[in-house]
Amino acid sequence: MQRWQGLPASDGIAIGPAWIFRPRQIQVQRRHVQDADAEWHRLETAVAQALAQLDVLAVQARAAVGEEQAAIFEAHALFLSDEELLAMLRQAIFSEHVNAEAAVEQSFEHYAALLLSLDNEYFQARAQDVRDVKRRLLRILSGCESEGAVSPSHPAVILAEDLTPSDTVQFERNKILGLCTVRGGPTSHTAILARALGVPAIVSAPLALDAIPTNATVILDGDTGEVTLNPTEEAMAQARRRQRQWLARRTKAISTAHEQAVTMDGHSVEVVANVGRIEDVQQALDMGAEGVGLFRTEFLYLDRSAMPTEEEQIQVYRQVFELLDGRPVVVRTLDIGGDKPAPYLDLAPEPNPFLGWRAIRMMDQRPDVLQAQLRALLIAAGRTDADLRIMLPLVSRLDEVRGARALLEDVRESLVKTGTPIPLRLQFGMMVETPAAALLAHHFADEVDFFSIGTNDLTQYTLAVDRTNERVAHLASPYHPAVLRLIAMTIAAAHERGKWVGLCGEFASDVLAVPILLGLGLDEFSMAPAAIPRVKEAIRHWHLPRCQEIARNVLEFPTAEAVEDYLMENMQ
Amino acid sequence: MSITRRIRLFEDIPMPAVTLTVNHPAGLHARPAAAFVKTAAAFPCRITVRNVHDDTPPVNAKSILSVLTLGVHQGYEIEVESQGEQAQEALDAIVNLIESNFGESE
């Protein structure tokens, strides 16, 4: 038995076989180049490719882990457009006549060294980001495009020298029992990822990785920071005891999350999850989700050169439906536009991708994309008895809903004709994320079975604020009474016609907003899995009549600030 | 927040400069650093920033890597200088950004 002391980074006890992560080393050969122009062009192409990869990774990370992880990849993209760095690369190629690889190596290492010389762990950790981007560029330049998709084949305790965001995003989440790194501090990516996944982690553990055999038994104690290799029977028994205690603690915290969210006076609402990958579904259920209120399907379409085949789509949907085991699942059809790379969809970069040819608007020119998706959804649901609810994104016109519904009818008929089983239960709905859809909700409600309000986009379009523009992003408040009134109109119009309404923006996970949404009569709250226990707990503290009074009052306020102040004063 | 504006003449070219205190808990790091660089990059003039606390030489305010290497923590003073077209407008935008605590209400 061997034992090392590291720093605890995420609590809990992991026991399992060791799996040692070794990033592929890229040796940089320094060469003299004659044709500097050609070399510069090579580098520029690699940078463009890296930016495209980072874009996809940010989307995946946002769906899989969360905003924090996505922001890391966005920062990486910022590095690649840094004018000082680009000047340094140019200088190396045009003045020193070195190859692109050597230029990348020396320029990125220059900044990594400067960051490492700072006396603060926070800034030092950014050296790791710089090197992560460097390795991405070198990998692209070397022609080994793929990152080699390294992940353990069975659930394991992952040991590594250090882990970059690009490394960790490769791991299949259900294969990670715990994470342990030799380097890195409590604010490293390893720690962030482990806490997001709820697995134990230790950083700064002085291990000699080469001396640890793969599959040797390892115990990580994320509470104390102790790493144990080949434990004695006694140490193992103790670890198992502590693991049981930890799991019991965790289960207790989550256990009330599995109970329904009911207000003090008995009004119950559905609390469901937003998911963007198959792996999220189990986590959602563990956190107490009663179903899925938003299943984003973009991941099926990104980072590939051809449309996903029908069979591929069926496989993915089927897995999701089987995991949900008859619980409701709202699937949003493809919501993609000119800001995302998908070469086979004829998407071109647009000056205003959020106002451009995207989402349901692609139906007129590419009905095949939606049709294929609807067909795959019906087939998968027919095989699994899913409670499927199909939802259209970015609707602003009635003919979009009618056109999609006709397409759905065609698909259904053709399946019936060939004797393919189709789902017994099927609802057809739409996102309310444009002011047009909210203002005409009474018309739209006649055409659909349900609405789901996308507050992130509804806020952006109502207040004319680009959420990705740092200078104005702070103006994008869903507490703005203009947004609240649109939400109120949408719910009232739907209820008048006996239709239900969900909300799947970040607003649903904001405990401050709970009384407004309860008071306005929202039927379904959909949010990131991690927020579910918190929001359910908040709902249980309110009486419905009090919420209705609060909702009535805030609609009369003139500003977002007035609404927030009032809510703070009236928090329960 | 202490703001002192001064005009310095260098070969007859006015170079407006301003000293500011960064009050954001992250310092000039993460989102604030990105916002700072994006704001600077929106202007055509040359803009430099230096860490007054550690008395570092000025770096290009439009370069995220250079700004990170300043190692500016919460409470540190920075000095921003601009030169050229829209020099004063650029400084005003940066003062605004930092005064508003990077757009986050305090």
Image: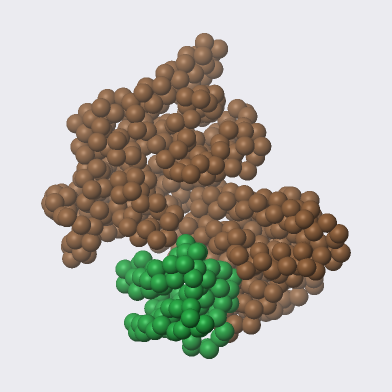
Chain colours: A brown, B green
Residue at image point 37% right, 26% down: A401
Does B44 appear above or below A402? below
Q: In the depicted view, which residue is nearer to us: A262 or A271? A: A271
Q: In the depicted view, which residue is nearer to us: A123 or A278? A: A123
Instruction: Report the residue that reaches farthest toward the top.
Output: A417
Instruction: Report the residue that reaches farthest toward the front.
Output: B12
**Residue A85 % position (x, y):** 65, 67
Residue A247 visible in this rendered orientation of the protein: no
**Residue A7 % position (x, y):** 59, 78
**Residue A285 % position (x, y):** 45, 48
Residue A453 visible in this rendered orientation of the protein: yes
Quadrant containing the C terminus of chain A in the rendered view = bottom left
Q: How many labels does the image show?
A: 0
Residue at image point 19% right, 31% down: A496
Does A169 appear above or below A91? above
**Residue A79 % position (x, y):** 60, 63
Does A497 appear above or below A74? above
Left or right: A508 in relation to A62: left
Residue at image point 62% right, 69% down: A84
Residue at image point 36% right, 23% down: A399
Q: In the depicted view, which residue is nearer to us: A68 or B58? A: B58
Residue A448's quadrant in the figure? top left
Quadrant containing the N terminus of chain A in the rendered view = bottom right
Left or right: A222 in relation to A413: right
Left or right: B50 in relation to A53: left
